[in-house]
Image (tube, rainbow, N blue to C red):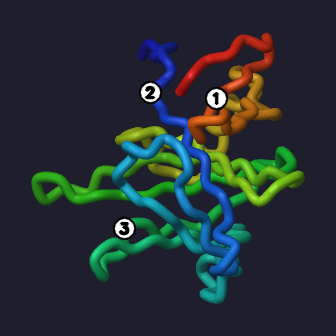
Amino acid sequence: MKKCSKLPDYKILIFEENPQRHNIYDLKTPENFTKFKYFRLEKPIKEYLIAQGVKFVCESWANNTKTLHTGLIPLGIDNYYFGDCYEIKNNRKIHSLIIFYFDSDSCKITLFYFNHFNKFSIQLNKQFCFEFIKKREVTTPPVYVQNQNLNYIRFDKANVINSL
């Protein structure tokens, strides 16, 4: 069986901690992402999550419906975790893999969101995420700053400026 060398499509999402609501992170960019606009982080309570190595539980809601519920598992690289989420389409669960990067210098969390891509086992997802981070050299993710128009501007490793 031939391995697919094409990297799946993903979005980079920036979330910032809400100063009025502890452990709530609001989407800052891109604004057109519609799967969830914020999430809450908590320590896991359920034994089955702790047994799987979950360090945080991430949840979000829209219109009294839970739109995100995942356990975050450490990748073994400082500040990197992974989880997944699903949506129902045509009566089928469709999973999407998410890599979380916790910026230790600020109250921001960067998500690498792989829409409709998932390896369906914790070990395979962990391996994919680890290889993605190493291959893409995202151990220091891109830096985003706001310009005078309050738009986020991306500075990559080569100091090339790309507007989002």
Q: Residues within 10 Å of mark 2 (few under 14, many from 20)?
A: few
User: Considering only vertical position in the picture, is 81 above or below 146?
Assistant: below
Residue 64, quarter of the rendered image: bottom left
Asked if the residue under mark 3 is in contact with the one under mark 2, i.e. CB atoms within 8 Å, the reply is no
Residue farthest front in this picture: 148
Horizontal relation, residue 134 to residue 52: left or right: right
Q: Which residue is mark 1?
A: 153
> What label does residue 67 carry, if any?
3
Q: Position of residue 88 (x, y in %)?
A: 22, 59
| Mark 1 or mark 2, whichever is nearer to me | 1
Q: Position of residue 86 (x, y in %)?
A: 36, 58
Q: Position of residue 47 (x, y in %)?
A: 64, 86
> What SS does tag 3 mark?
strand
> What label does residue 132 carry, if any?
none
Which numbered disc flags the more N-terminal residue, 3 or 1? 3
Using the image as rendered, state which of residue 123 and residue 106 is in the foreground.
106
> What SS does tag 1 mark?
strand
Q: Is residue 1 visible?
A: yes
Asked if the residue under mark 1 is in contact with the one under mark 3, i.e. CB atoms within 8 Å, the reply is no
Residue 73, quarter of the rendered image: bottom right
The residue sitting at 65% across, 35% down in the picture is 148
Which numbered disc flags the more N-terminal residue, 2 or 3? 2
Using the image as rendered, state which of residue 132 and residue 138 is in the foreground.
138
Q: Position of residue 38 (x, y in %)?
A: 50, 64
Q: Which residue is mark 2?
A: 9
Query: Gap between marks 1 and 2, in whole Å?
Result: 21 Å
Using the image as rendered, state which of residue 110 and residue 144 is in the foreground.
144
The residue sitting at 59% across, 41% down in the picture is 150
| Mark 3 or mark 1, whichever is nearer to me | 1
